[in-house]
Every structure is written in C-alpha cells, then in structure tokens.
Image (tube, helix red, strand yellow):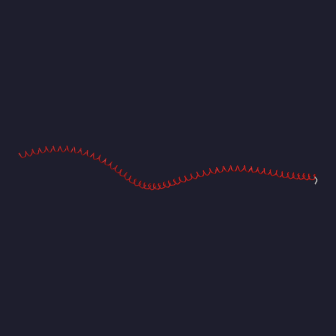
Amino acid sequence: MPENDVLQAIVANLEKINGRLDTIEKRLDKIEQRLERIEQRIDKVEQRLDKVEQRLDKVEQRLDKVEERLDKVEKRLDIVEMRLDKLEERVAKLEEDVQVIKQDIVILKENDKELTRRMNAVYDQVAFLTEFRTEMIMFRDEVYKRFDNLEQQTGRLKEGFEYLRDMTVEHEIDIRFLKRVVRAS
C-alpha cells in the first residue's frame, strides 16, 4: 500500500479515533454532568441528613428531658397518692370520730333532758322554798308581833300580878288582923 493510502488510513483511523474520543468525551461529559448532579443531589441529601440528624439530636434531647420530667411527674404522682392515702385515712378516722361524737351527742341530749327535768324540779323546789321562806318571814313577823303583844300582856299581867300580890299581902294582913281580933274577942 502506498504511503498515501497508509497515511489516509491512519488519518481515517485517527478521525475515527477522534470521533470515538469525541463521543467518549461527550459521554464522559454527560457522565460528569450526571455525576455532578448526583453529587449535588448527594450534597443536598447530606445537608438534609445533617438537618435530620440535628433535629434527631434535638428530639433525643427533648425526649431525654421529657423522660426526666415524666419521671419527676411519676414521683410527684406517687407522693400525691401517698398524701391522698393519708388524707383518706384521716377522713376515715374523722368519720369514726364523728360517729363517736354523734353517739356522745345522743347521750348528752338524753342527759340534757334528765338535767332539764331535774333543774325544773329544783326550780319548783326553789319556788316552793322561796314561797315557804316568804311565809316563814311573814310567820316570824307575826310571831314577833305576838311576842311583843305577849310581852306587853305579860308586863301588864306582871303588873296585875304584883298588884294582886300586894293586894293579897294586904288582905292577908287584914285577915290576920281580923283573925286576931276574932280570937281576942
């Protein structure tokens, strides 16, 4: 083959190679473009993933705080339940005390009725004694008046008795004198 033909064959081969290389470069460009788009998409995915991980971290922190708060709430609830149990016990005791007090009140009412009855009897007795006292005072005053009258009468009787005694003595003297006169005569 002549040299020219060889050269032409080489040039044709080179052009084929160049054509193939152009195709390869175009394909490679497309692949690079696709790869770049893929990398961009991966970058976007990574950015989103970073945001998701950040949000996830925040959510985990919030969840930890919520769990802590829930633990605290459960502990507080336990304390409230214990306090409520104690209050229920106290209320039950108060109810028992109220029942005892109600029974005591019934007894006190019965005692009050008895005391009222007795007090009424005492009032009646006091009224009777007051009336009796008034009568006794009146009786005493009457007795004092009578006693004064008796003293006055006794005084008069005494005077009368003394008068009669004096008269009796005089009469006795007169009788003795008359007896002597009669004996002497």
The quadrant the N terminus occupies is bottom right
Left or right: residue 102 versus residue 138 is right
Left or right: residue 159 versus residue 68 is left
Report the front residue among 85 and 124. Answer: 85
Report the front residue among 106 and 156. Answer: 106
Report the front residue among 109 and 79. Answer: 79
Left or right: residue 135 versus residue 66 is left
| Figure label count | 0
Q: How far from the left and from the top, in percent, is residue 179?
A: 8, 46
Report the front residue among 11 and 172. Answer: 11
Q: How far from the left and from the top, in percent, is residue 98?
A: 47, 54
Q: How far from the left and from the top, in percent, is residue 24?
A: 84, 52
Q: How far from the left and from the top, in percent, is residue 58?
A: 66, 49
